[in-house]
Image (spheres, helix red, strand yellow):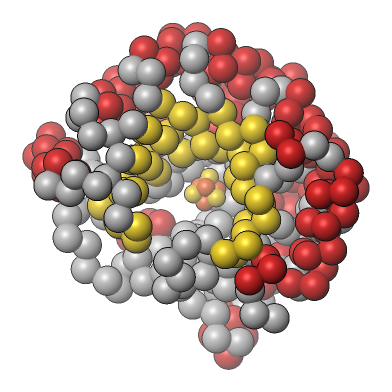
């Protein structure tokens, strides 16, 4: 597994990991990690959502829901997060690269008028140059049917200096861009991260956060509440908390459903709705993200 998904940590994230144990757990392999064989024995897959095994109708495009389309823009990240759902498939995923690929991806969306939300994902789209990022943003934002172009990036957390004033202004110009990011513990909400969020918000780009519930990182109500308060103060909207997916190589991060429900309940009693994300489980084959109350133990 490590061979497919080697440790890779950019300099900013290395410095953060040196002073934060919960962040270091996301950056570096743990001795608690199961071997590939043990993971397979437990029924964990490297590709639980069948992203590689199911033939894509169009290179670099994935569609699970009628109104949303995911576009693979890059298979690189600023940090290879140890808990990544796509850890086993990222390096082999097809991405939209050439002008021809992009034209076909846009045609794919145009042929499906119900699509109104495009997720520019990967990997991390912000590993591309500003010009390449804007090539994707502009191509989809120009379609009348599209209301939302989501730039899915962990840069505000793991490499916040990537968010420059020029990039923030360019993203804000289309008036359709939302940045979706991921912060998992309060230590990650640094002065640099707050500055990155401020640049985006002040350029007219809403920023929301999808947190992953991870054992040893944020598996207590106190840790989650500290994170949600810090995000809200930085004008980053806590949006979802995901249960860790059943992916080979990340079993040591998984938190039981009972514990997750207890954390959710305590958070709901302790913080206002604007700072309270939805706790959900994204199960292979499910037609929507399930609230924890609907997940079978
Ligand atoms: S930034 Fe996202 S896609 Fe990249 S390794 Fe981390 S979780 Fe996976």
Count up the numbered dots. Answer: 0
Relative height, residue 61 to residue 51 (above, below): above
Instruction: Give the residue at the far bottom of this rendering.
Output: 41
- Asked whether residue 105 is in view, the answer is no
Which x, y percent locates residue 152?
A: 46, 39
Q: Which is more toward the observer, 116 or 167?
A: 116
Residue drawn 54% across the image and 18% down it: 200
Q: Locate residue 111, reporting x and y percent.
A: 12, 47
95 lies left or right of 102: right
Which quadrant would residue 169 be assigned to in this image? top left
Please name the residue shown 47% across and 62% down the image.
288
Residue 138 appears in the picture as rendered: yes
| Residue 41 in the image: above or below residue 232 | below
Q: Quadrant of residue 66?
A: bottom left
Is residue 230 found left or right of 68 in the rendered image? right
Residue placed at 33% from the left, 31% from the top? Answer: 147
220 sits left or right of 210 in the view: right
Q: Quadrant of the C terminus?
A: bottom right
* In this picture, residue 234 sits left or right of residue 50: right
Work out whether 207 lies above or below 124. Answer: above
């Amino acid at each position: 597994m490590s061979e497919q998904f080697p440790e890779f940590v950019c300099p900013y994230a290395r410095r953060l990991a040196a002073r934060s144990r919960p962040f270091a757990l996301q950056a570096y392999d743990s001795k608690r990690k199961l071997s590939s064989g043990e993971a397979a024995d437990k029924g964990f897959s490297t590709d639980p959502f069948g992203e590689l095994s199911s033939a894509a109708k169009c290179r670099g495009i994935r569609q699970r829901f009628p109104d949303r389309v995911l576009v693979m823009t890059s298979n690189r990240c600023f940090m290879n997060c140890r808990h990544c759902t796509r850890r086993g498939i990222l390096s082999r995923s097809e991405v939209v690269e050439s002008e021809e690929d992009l034209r076909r991806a846009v045609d794919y969306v145009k042929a499906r008028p119900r699509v109104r939300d495009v997720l520019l994902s990967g990997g991390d789209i912000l590993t591309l140059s500003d010009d390449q990022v804007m090539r994707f943003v502009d191509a989809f934002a120009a379609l009348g049917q599209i209301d939302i172009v989501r730039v899915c990036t962990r840069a505000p957390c793991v490499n916040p200096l990537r968010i420059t004033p020029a990039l923030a202004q360019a993203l804000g110009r289309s008036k359709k861009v939302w940045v979706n990011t991921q912060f998992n513990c309060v230590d990650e909400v640094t002065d640099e991260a707050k500055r990155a969020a401020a640049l985006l918000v002040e350029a007219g780009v809403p920023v929301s956060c999808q947190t992953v519930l991870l054992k040893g990182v944020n598996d207590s109500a106190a840790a989650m509440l500290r994170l949600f308060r810090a995000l809200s103060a930085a004008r980053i909207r806590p949006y979802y908390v995901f249960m860790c997916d059943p992916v080979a190589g990340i079993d040591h991060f998984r938190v039981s459903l009972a514990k997750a429900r207890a954390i959710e309940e305590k958070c709901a009693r302790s913080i206002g709705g604007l700072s309270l994300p939805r706790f959900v489980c994204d199960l292979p084959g499910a037609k929507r993200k399930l609230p924890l109350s609907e997940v079978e133990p």
